[in-house]
Image (cartoon, helix red, strand yellow):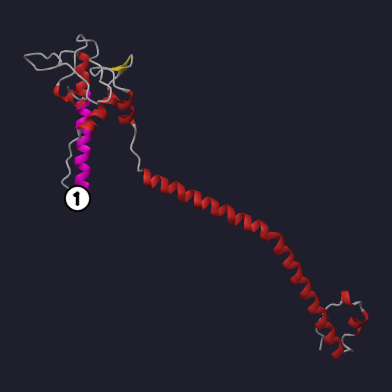
């Protein structure tokens, strides 16, 4: 029994051996594979498709491990974490890049739906994502409440402004009447007008 990571040990089955390999047993992530025929002199995989897949996946693996090493160097936090890909990460990379033909992956065979689905699902920081969504919902509700409150206050504010204006006009009339009584000669013209048309006269020119 071998995992997808055995691509890197030259264990890809030839297209001539059972076509595309044996199917994966339900409930396990380890498919059965057959050793790929290799050239006894060069040690290279003879099957051209298998050889190309092995080269491509090896290059991807090396690039990812180089990125891990560079990220650890940039972090410079004294971490001793391994810069090698885990078997699970290698398996996922193989699943993403090995071609599928008639529901079977070359060199692997038929992978059970549960395994394929679970291994292909991206991992999200679910807790932080949910918290952001809840915060956005709360802010939206608060904004809606504020807007409704402003809309409700608008008619009230209009009535209050009208009441204040009427009170100021009444005070102006009272002050004008009081001054005209103190200085009847200067405000004789004002006294002869109706109360609703009373205005404050300009200062007399000396």
Q: Is residue 47 above or below residue 27?
A: above
The residue at the point 22 percent across, 47 percent down is 74
User: Going by the image, does 175 lie left or right of 103?
Assistant: right
What residue is rendered at 23% in x and 43% in y?
Answer: 71
The residue stretch that appears in magenta? 56-75
Give the residue furthest to the front.
27
Q: Position of residue 67 (x, y in %)?
A: 22, 38
Q: Is 21 drawn above or below residue 128 in the view shown? A: above
| Closer-to-camera residue (152/83) | 152
Left or right, residue 193 beside residue 7: right
SS for callout 1: loop
Q: Quadrant of residue 164?
A: bottom right
Point out residue 121 in the picture as x, y percentages from the top left corner.
34, 32
Q: Which residue appears farthest toward the right when viewing the image?
A: 192
Point out residue 177 in the picture as x, y percentages from the top left corner.
85, 84
Provide the residue designation for mark 1: 76
Q: Nearer the viewer, residue 128 or 94?
A: 128
Compared with 163, 55 (above or below) is: above
Classify residue 106 as left or right of residue 82. Answer: right
User: Residue reaching furthest left?
Assistant: 41
Residue 158 screen position, x and y as percent: 73, 63
Q: How many marks?
A: 1
């Amino acid at each position: 029994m071998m995992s997808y990571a055995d691509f890197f040990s030259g264990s890809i089955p030839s297209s001539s051996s059972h076509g595309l390999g044996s199917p994966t047993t339900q409930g396990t992530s380890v498919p059965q594979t057959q050793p790929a025929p290799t050239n006894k002199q060069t040690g290279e995989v003879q099957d051209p498709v298998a050889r190309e897949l092995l080269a491509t996946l090896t290059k991807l693996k090396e690039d990812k491990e180089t990125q891990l090493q560079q990220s650890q160097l940039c972090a410079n936090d004294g971490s001793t974490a391994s810069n090698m890909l885990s078997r699970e990460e290698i398996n996922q990379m193989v699943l993403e890049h090995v071609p599928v033909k008639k529901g079977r992956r070359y060199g692997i065979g038929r992978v059970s739906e549960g395994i394929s689905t679970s291994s292909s699902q991206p991992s999200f920081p679910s807790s932080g994502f949910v918290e952001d969504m809840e915060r956005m919902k709360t802010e939206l509700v608060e904004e809606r409440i504020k807007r409704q409150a402003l809309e409700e206050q608008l008619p009230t504010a209009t009535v209050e402004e009208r009441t204040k204006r009427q009170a100021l006009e009444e005070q102006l009339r009272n002050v004008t009447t009081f001054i005209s009584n103190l200085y009847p000669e200067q405000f004789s013209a004002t006294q002869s007008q109706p109360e609703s048309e009373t205005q404050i006269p300009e200062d007399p020119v000396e």
